[in-house]
Image (spheres, rainbow, N blue to C red):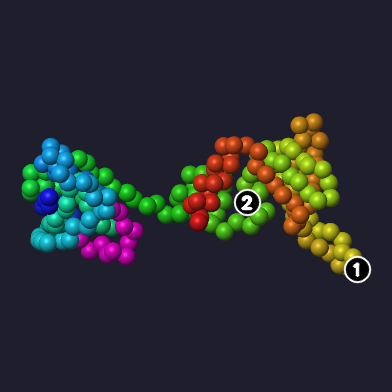
C-alpha cells in the first residue's frame, strides 16, 4: 500500500550550495494499516523525496516542501548542506498524509577526515610512512622479529633514522632503527628492513590500528 509523505522545513539564508558537505535527514514511516494487517512487507531501500514547492520571503527565510510516495515501512532521505543543519532541526516537520505513523527522524553529518583521525589514540596523518606509524606507537608493547636475531619483546622507546657506513669508501646508508625496553630493563635495538616484522601486542591498540586503517581506506 502506498502512502504520501510530506516534509516541510524553513531555512535561513538559502544560498548554500550542494558543493558543501552534505547532511542527510532520514524519516522512517510506517503505515498503520500494514502494521494491523501484515499485508505489506518492509522495503529496505531508501526513497528520496523531491522538492515540490519553494517559497522565498523578503526577510531571508525560505520554505521548502518535499512531497512523494513511499511503500510500506521505508526510510526517506532529504539532503541539505551542513550549514543548514541548525535551521532544519528547528523547523523540520514530517507528515504522513495517508494516516501512517512516523517512527523517527535522524540525521548524519560526516566530519572531515582530519577531525575523525584526531579522535584516535594514534596521532597519525592520512599518509604516514612505516617509521611514522611505528613512532605513533611509542610506549606500546611490541614484538619485533628479524632474520638475523632473536625475537624482541618490550615497550617501544623510539624509532630513529641512523646513518650506517656503506661497503665502499665514503658510502653511507640511511636506515630506521627501532628500540625497545625489555621487561628486564635492557634497551635493545634492531634495524627496520624488509626482513623485520613488528606485531602490536596490546589488544586495544590493535583495535585502534584497525579503526585508523578503516578511516583512511
- For label 1, the SS is loop
Number of other residues with Cα within 10 Å of mark 2, as a class: few under 14, some 14 to 19, many 20 or more: some
Whether residue 89 is visible here, answered yes or no, is no
Q: Residue furthest top?
A: 184
Residue 35, position as x, y percentages in the image: 15, 39
In the image: residue 15, left or right of residue 208: left
Residue 212, position as x, y percentages in the image: 53, 49
Q: Earlier in the sequence, mark 2 or mark 1?
A: 2
Image: magenta residue range: 14-25
Disc 2 to disc 1, how far (Cα)? 32 Å
Residue 98, position as x, y percentages in the image: 7, 48
Numbered label attached to residue 217 = none
In the image: residue 170, left or right of residue 75: right
Task: Give the residue displayed 73% in from the left and 37% down from the top.
Answer: 154
- Say if the magenta span includes residue 16: yes
Please identify the dominant SS of the magenta region. Answer: loop
Instruction: Name the residue nearer the viewer: 76 or 127.
Output: 76
- Where is mark 2, residue-wise? 133
Number of other residues with Cα within 10 Å of mark 1, as a class: few under 14, some 14 to 19, many 20 or more: few
Numbered label attached to residue 168 = 1
- Say if the magenta span includes residue 20: yes
Amino acid at each position: 500500500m502506498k502512502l504520501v509523505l510530506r516534509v516541510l522545513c524553513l531555512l535561513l539564508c538559502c544560498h548554500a550550495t550542494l558543493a558543501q558537505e552534505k547532511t542527510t535527514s532520514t524519516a522512517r514511516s510506517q503505515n498503520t494499516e500494514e502494521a494491523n494487517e501484515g499485508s505489506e512487507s518492509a522495503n529496505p531501500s531508501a526513497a528520496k523525496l523531491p522538492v515540490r514547492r519553494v517559497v522565498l520571503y523578503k526577510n531571508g527565510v525560505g520554505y521548502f516542501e518535499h512531497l512523494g510516495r513511499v511503500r510500506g515501512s521505508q526510510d526517506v532521505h532529504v539532503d541539505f548542506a551542513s550549514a543548514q543543519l541548525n535551521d532544519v532541526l528547528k523547523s523540520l516537520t514530517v507528515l504522513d498524509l495517508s494516516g501512517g505513523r512516523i517512527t523517527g527522524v535522524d540525521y548524519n553529518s560526516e566530519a572531515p577526515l582530519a577531525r575523525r583521525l584526531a579522535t584516535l589514540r594514534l596521532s597519525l596523518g592520512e599518509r604516514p610512512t612505516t617509521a611514522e606509524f611505528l613512532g605513533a606507537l611509542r610506549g606500546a608493547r611490541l614484538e619485533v622479529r628479524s632474520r638475523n636475531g632473536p625475537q624482541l619483546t618490550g615497550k617501544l622507546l623510539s624509532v630513529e633514522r641512523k646513518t650506517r657506513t656503506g661497503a665502499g669508501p665514503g658510502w653511507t646508508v640511511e636506515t630506521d632503527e627501532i628500540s625497545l625496553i625489555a621487561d628486564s630493563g635492557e634497551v635493545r635495538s634492531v634495524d627496520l628492513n624488509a626482513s623485520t616484522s613488528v606485531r602490536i601486542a596490546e589488544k586495544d591498540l590493535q583495535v585502534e590500528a584497525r579503526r585508523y586503517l578503516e578511516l583512511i581506506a
